[in-house]
Amino acid sequence: MTERLRFAPSPTGPLHIGGLRTALYNYLYAKKHQGQVVLRIEDTDQTRYVAGAEDYIFNALEWMEIPPDESPKHGGNYGPYRQSERKEVYHEHIKHLVASGKAYYAFDTPDELEVLRAAATAKGEVFTYNAAVRERLKNSLNCTEEETQQYLDSGNYVVRLKVSPNTMVTVKDLLRGTITINSSTLDDKVLMKADGLPTYHFANVVDDHLMAITTVIRGEEWLPSLALHQLLYDAFGWESPKFIHLPLILKSEGKGKLSKRDGIQGGYPVFPLDWDEMKGFKENGFFPEVLRNFLLLIGWNGGTEQEIYTLEEMIAAFDVSGLQKGGGRFDYKKALWMNAQYLQQLPLQSLRTAGAVYLKALEGRYSEEALLQIVALAQPRITFIQELTAATYCFHSGPTEYDEKPLRKIKDRLPTSFFDWCEAHLPNTDVANLKAALQTWCEAEGCGFGVVMQGLRLALVGSLTGPDVMAIIALVGTEELLKRIRTLKEVINN
């Protein structure tokens, strides 16, 4: 049997990285088994619908390079892939359940149910609409056919699942094992709402069956609903898919699930792409390959020391046995490290091409060969590709300010004769011979070579950090070096 998996988000806002990880795991599992992934938009709750959210989902998956095989956008043989377009399908199946005695119409108004809940609360109890109370409530199990028809004609009704009491419901999860639940702890869940739209539970089961889904990978927040879903499969006489309920992504510090607020307070992204004023991983400078890698390891371990995977390696390695039951902590520092690792492993030409927009100030000033050398000097020093601008600044302009502490030291330790030597010799000294010439001068003057090198670095960069000094000089040339040394002299004298 061909493996078919589905990712079924609701368009109620941006796709959180927890949902993105679920999409990734579905993709990896499907591709490992030569299967397909279905993207289904679960939009039956129109009160929570957010404009732009569906496009955001598509854009995020495309950027992550884990596109679905079937979706509202890609088409397929099992559509429609938006639940709002499948109303007739749900009505047909709800009629089947009612006709077979597995479900019933309930006519209790929200106000009437609220009174019952309040009365139960007053007694220290919890009201549950189930086999213990349904025989004395207002529904098609107790009404005559004529009364039932009158209620149906009014349009004010819901459809509930008829749960048999004291039945042991056994469900299986590939990660968590076998779970057994007494049906008496479950309520007669609403399957079809008064507005004629299905609830999540009903639409979810019907769609998974009709779309031939073989394995369901979703978050652990749906684990308490698994018994209800199994009862629905049983009511229809359908075989249920395999289930895997993923652990939560936890806060980087403290307890609980990672949230948008954590990202705001911690200053890090929790969405793949920009949403309103919240920057996404993409806009922060992360590569999709890095985010895939980062999310893969929040809740899964391949059993080796490997931390950097290509997409092909992920597909080959991904297995349910590597999933952890407990929540995985969100470690933003690890994401930063991964992005730096990815950048440092990029071929120079690839980095040059990807970072072209950040190297515009150097275009026309250097040959392509020289630009690749500049990129090579910057590569070990950046975490994000947009940092190329700052990391290569010294190649197109001298410093506009200097680190104060080393500047004070240089002022006291670097003799004025150094500046005189530069004026006399730099115009006529080949870059290849510059280091040796400076060493000879230092020996003659009794000046430490380290002090001279610090002076050169300050003149070139403005601080004591940056690429190799001689490598910088080889690219900017001795004429530009002399200009910057003159500027440094003015700053020291002033």
Image (spheres, rainbow, N blue to C red):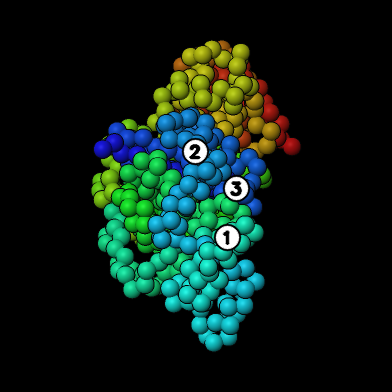
Q: CA distance from mark 1 to mark 3?
A: 40 Å
Quadrant location of the C terminus?
A: top right
**Mark 3 or mark 2, which is nearer the start of the sequence?**
3
Q: Is residue 241 visible?
A: yes
Q: Is residue 146 above or below residue 441?
A: below
Q: Which residue in the structure is indicated by mark 1?
A: 149
Query: For mark 2, what is the residue?
Result: 81
Rendered location of residue 412, percent (x, y): 61, 41
Which residue is found at the position 42% from the left and 69% from the top? 186
227 sits left or right of 376 in the view: left
Q: Is residue 261 visible?
A: no
Q: Nearer the viewer, mark 1 or mark 2?
A: 1
Residue 223 lies in quadrant: bottom left
Q: Position of residue 119 (x, y in %)?
A: 58, 83
From the image, state whether disc 2 or disc 3 is nearer to you: 2
Tag 3 residue? 13
Q: Amino acid at mark 2?
A: Tyr
Seen at 59% across and 26% down, the residue is: 358
Say which element carries label 2: loop
Q: Quadrant of residue 157?
A: bottom right
Asked if residue 434 is positioned above or below residue 154 in the image, the reply reads: above
- How many residues crowd around disc 1 within 10 Å: few (fewer than 14), some, or many (20 or more)? few
- Which residue appears at 36% of the width and 53% of the height? 236
Which residue is nearer to you in this view: 22 or 209?
209
- SS class, disc 1: helix
From the viewer's perspective, tell me whether residue 3 is left or right of residue 23: left
Quarter in which the N terminus is drawn: top left
Q: Position of residue 432 (x, y in %)?
A: 46, 16
Mark 1: amino acid: Gln
In the image: residue 383, left or right of residue 238: right
Question: Residue 301's spot in the image, x, y percent?
Answer: 31, 49
Kind of residue indicated by mark 3: Gly
